[in-house]
Image (spheres, helix red, strand yellow):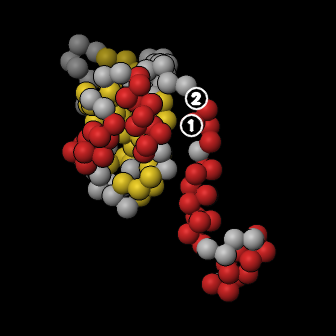
Amino acid sequence: MAFAAAFRRILNGSSTPSLNIRSQFASIRLNSTLATLTTPKLFISGLSRNTTDENLYKAFAPFGRLLEAKVIMDRGSGRSKGFGFVTYETVEDAEKAREGMNAKFLDGWVIFVDPARPREAQPRPPPRQDMQSNEAGFTTNKTVGWSGF
């Protein structure tokens, strides 16, 4: 396996694997450098499961005045979902942070910094028509029978 990787590097003209890896990380997210920031809120993806709000805050604090740094947690397990958000006071500070932290390591993982998009409205499912309640509080389900819920 190592021989094949070395052979590929020779064919590609790269003699040092570290330069090749750095260039791969830099080219992974070209679209994030093309999008212009309109809001001071940034979306951070690729976070380690061990990254906390405090670690995220410390990593992004040198780029400007941070208002919030939040790692999104799974309600069921209490673990990180692998992404988060940081909010700066100004768009200029957010732009500096995006340029300084995109494709960098945080807690051993490569993170990506993109502009945050507004949350899309989730359509509510229509109410179920096959269930009916009575005065006693029982729900009758026409497909299964009755239940105490």
Q: Mark 2 — residue? A: 35
* Numbered tag placed on residue 7 in the rendering: none
Of residue 149 and residue 80, the one placed in the foreground of this image is: 80
114 left or right of 31? left
Residue 119 in the image: state x and y as whole percent. Answer: 45, 23
In this view, the residue in front, 82 or 42, is 42
* Secondary-structure class at tag 1: helix
Identify residue type, mark 1.
Ser
Where does label 1 land, which residue?
32
At horizontal 60% and vertical 72% (from top left) the residue drawn is 17
Residue 122 versus residue 60 in the image, above or below: above
Where residue 121 appears, x then y in whole percent? 47, 19
Q: How packed is label 2: few (under 14 Cα within 10 Å), some, or many (20 or more)?
A: few
Considering depth in this image, is 73 or 34 the residue closer to the camera? 34
Q: Are marks 1 and 2 in contact (CB under 8 Å)?
A: yes
Taking the spot 41% from the left edge, 25% from the top edge, the residue there is 92
Query: CA separation, marks 1 and 2?
Result: 6 Å
Relative placement, left or right, of 36 versus 3 is: left
Task: Name the quadrant containing residue 32.
Answer: top right
Residue at 27% of width from left, 29% of height from top? 65
Residue 41 drawn at (x, y percent): 39, 27
Q: Quadrant of the C terminus?
A: top left
Residue at far bottom of view: 3
Q: Residue at x 36, y 54 (%)?
A: 106
Q: Is residue 12 above or below residue 115?
A: below
- Identity of the amino acid at label 2? Ala
